Amino acid sequence: MNAGPSGFHNAPVTKGIVLACGLASVLIGTQGGARALSLSYQKFVQKQQLWRLLTSPWVFSSTPEVLFGLYLVYFFRVFERQIGSNKYLFYVFFSTTTSTILEVAALAVIRDPTALTGIFLTPGPYGLIFASFVPFFFDIPISTRLKFLGARFSDKSFVYLAGLQLLLSSWTQSLVPGVCGLLAGLLYKSNILGIRKVKFPEGLASAATRLFTPLLSSNSTLPTTVRGAAPNGRLLEHRFAPSAPPVSAQSEVHITTLMAMGFDRSDALQALAAARNDVALATNLLLESQLR
């Protein structure tokens, strides 16, 4: 599976998360300060340290967690490209908030009154990361299969292995946030109360572009990243001329594959029509149009 064009093209919210979590983890987490920001029943409930709700989801506590965690956040930028930055920003808010609430509930259940410090949970954006595994499992198709030492793998297997490494990095302390993130992802997937249609105002999503573009170059522009549309729509319309033979029955699998790579659905349809439903040729046409 391909996560789409390299870099943070059409993914300003993901860019902000990667930079913020990366810098905070390097400055605080890997220096031993993450423990002071983690959630625990004694510190949160008994000492009323509510500020932990805001700090805990954004700092990894160790170098391996930083590497695997930021890789997964970066890889899942494909979902921001699919639904647009406005909806993705709300998805980040919903998955993080819901996961944090579930973590607090879990701490209340598994608390140990006899312990001096109590059980604490590993900090980091576990809610966002593991919530993203839900659409990754249900919505992203397998494009490549391989066999190694008698075992069968797909191109998605390596993403699952990275998630498993992160999930078990601190045993129970990381397992609980990971499971809470999966539950948050399932709630969003269920579309309860039409939650998947909710999006933040354009100003909030576009703020990520204005804030982080000077720190890390990107080809994305404000209007296209906010709408989640392909930046070269007009060029595509010109390149894929109407005279191209129409495809009698578009393959939904091919369309989903191209959208997973970050392309707009209408552009994917035009490219497949021009390529006579050849997904490889359609991908080349779309990539070439972006380079013009």
Image: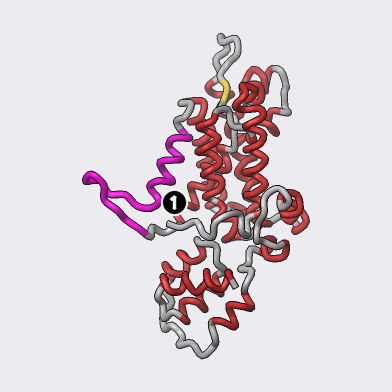
Q: Position of residue 219 (x, y in %)?
A: 65, 61
Colour option used: secondary structure
Residue farthest right in this picture: 203
Q: Which residue: 58% across, 12% down? A: 113
Q: Which residue corresponds to the image point at 71% horizontal and 53% vertical from the top-left? A: 213
Q: Can residue 50 be seen at all in this image of the molecule?
A: yes
Q: Which residues are magenta?
A: 144-167
SS label for mark 1? helix
> Closer to the camera, 49 or 236?
236
Q: Is residue 19 left or right of residue 189?
A: right
Q: Residue furthest left?
A: 150
Instruction: Measuring from the top left, give residue 200's x and y in whole percent.
Output: 72, 54
Q: Which residue is mark 1?
A: 137
- Residue 41, position as x, y percentages in the image: 62, 21
What is the quadrant of the N terminus in the image? bottom left
Residue 83, compared with residue 212, is above or below; it is below
* Picture coordinates of residue 2, whole percent (x, y): 46, 58
**Amino acid on which the number 1 mark rests in the picture:** Phe
Out of 141 and 29, give the one closest to the viewer: 29
Considering every residue shown, the one lying at the far bottom of the view is 243
> Is 147 contained in the magenta span?
yes
